[in-house]
Amino acid sequence: MSETSQIVAGLVHELGNPLCAIGNYAHSLEDKVAPEHRAILQSMQREVARVQRMMESLGDYARPRDPGMLGADANVALRDAVRFLRDQGVFRNIILDEQLDTAALPVKATALELEQTFANLLLNAADAMPGGGTLGLFTKRVPRTTLTDGSVRRHGDASPPVVLRRDERIERWLVAHEMAQVVKIIVADSGPGIEPGSEDRIFEPFVTTKSPEHGTGLGLAIVRGIVNTMGGLVWVQRSREGGAAFHIVVPVFAADTAGSAPPR
Ligand SMILES: Nc1ncnc2c1ncn2[C@@H]1O[C@H](COP(=O)(O)OP(=O)(O)O)[C@@H](O)[C@H]1O
Ligand SMILES: [Mg+2]
């Protein structure tokens, strides 16, 4: 557990009780104050609940992990996250277009971390399509070389994405990571997409366009944090469906590739 994680976990723990108490005090005062002041106490409770939601996300993120649990399968976690959210009615009116690899996709993360990553992306996609739409899910295990020649595309895609800056980022990432095989994951929606110029900013903590009841702005910061610990790269670009497509590339977990040296 990193020092930062320890501090975050400690803070979440220490702040949890007093925060809960503040919420309870505000609640217990509601019927003791003049009716015109009740709204203030209710606002206090809403704000407390908002901070509690943020702390819950951070607490999940900072939870210590057992190295023996690394190597979870990206497809399994994605399916679990989809099933979990579908059972909650999150995908009502949304058509799922799944193109998942049949190969094993072990990555350097626990099942919980992967599910958290996917749940954040899937929830954002659902939020972006309140009136329904299409959610494309793509996973593929590929040799590292295919990442640069543009051959990692979903079927139906006419041409490789011509976003030069992203390609440079992939190049740099490939230089820094010696894996032979890469897991490529795309979560794409048909919503309005990301406002041009905000593609990097949305990954920063507390950046949100949602109302305080709906968004904490922590989802993508957590996604990026988890993808970083996997040694991966995440970015957003325009989806084939016209919305946002979140792309993740991560090395196939070493335990699975031992013996197969990366091509030189
Ligand atoms: N699939 C998407 N389509 C459009 N906008 C998105 C999508 N995913 C994320 N965003 C934008 O990025 C912002 C940050 O997302 P996130 O970090 O998950 O925080 P939150 O969902 O709490 O707002 C969102 O408020 C939204 O403006
Ligand atoms: Mg979110």
Image (cartoon, grey):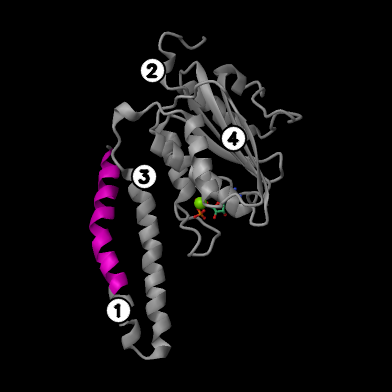
Q: Are marks 4 and 2 in contact (CB under 8 Å)?
A: no
Q: Residue at x 47, y 18 (%)?
A: 179
As helix, strand or loop, the secondary structure at mark 3 comes to helix
For mark 2, does the 10 Å Cα neighbourhood hold few (<14), some (14 to 19), or many (20 or more) residues?
few
Query: Of the residues shown, which amino acid type is indicated by label 2?
Result: Ala
- Of callouts 4 and 2, the N-terminal one: 4
Q: CA distance from mark 1 to mark 3?
A: 32 Å
As helix, strand or loop, the secondary structure at mark 4 comes to strand
As helix, strand or loop, the secondary structure at mark 1 comes to helix
- Read off the magenta span: 2-24
Q: CA distance from mark 4 to mark 2?
A: 24 Å
State the image quarter where residue 55 is shown.
bottom left
Q: Are marks 2 and 3 in contact (CB under 8 Å)?
A: no
Q: Which residue is disc 1 drawn over?
A: 28
In this view of the protein, which residue sits in the foreground, 38 or 160? 38
Q: Which residue is disc 2 drawn over?
A: 255
- Of callouts 1 and 3, the N-terminal one: 1
Report x, y in % for residue 123: 54, 49
Does mark 3's beta carbon lie closer than 8 Å to ligand 1? no
As helix, strand or loop, the secondary structure at mark 2 comes to helix
Q: Residue at x 47, y 35 (%)?
A: 77
Residue 262 vs 161, above or below: the answer is above
- Of callouts 1 and 4, the N-terminal one: 1
- Res. 61 mark: 3
State the image quarter where residue 71 is shown.
top left
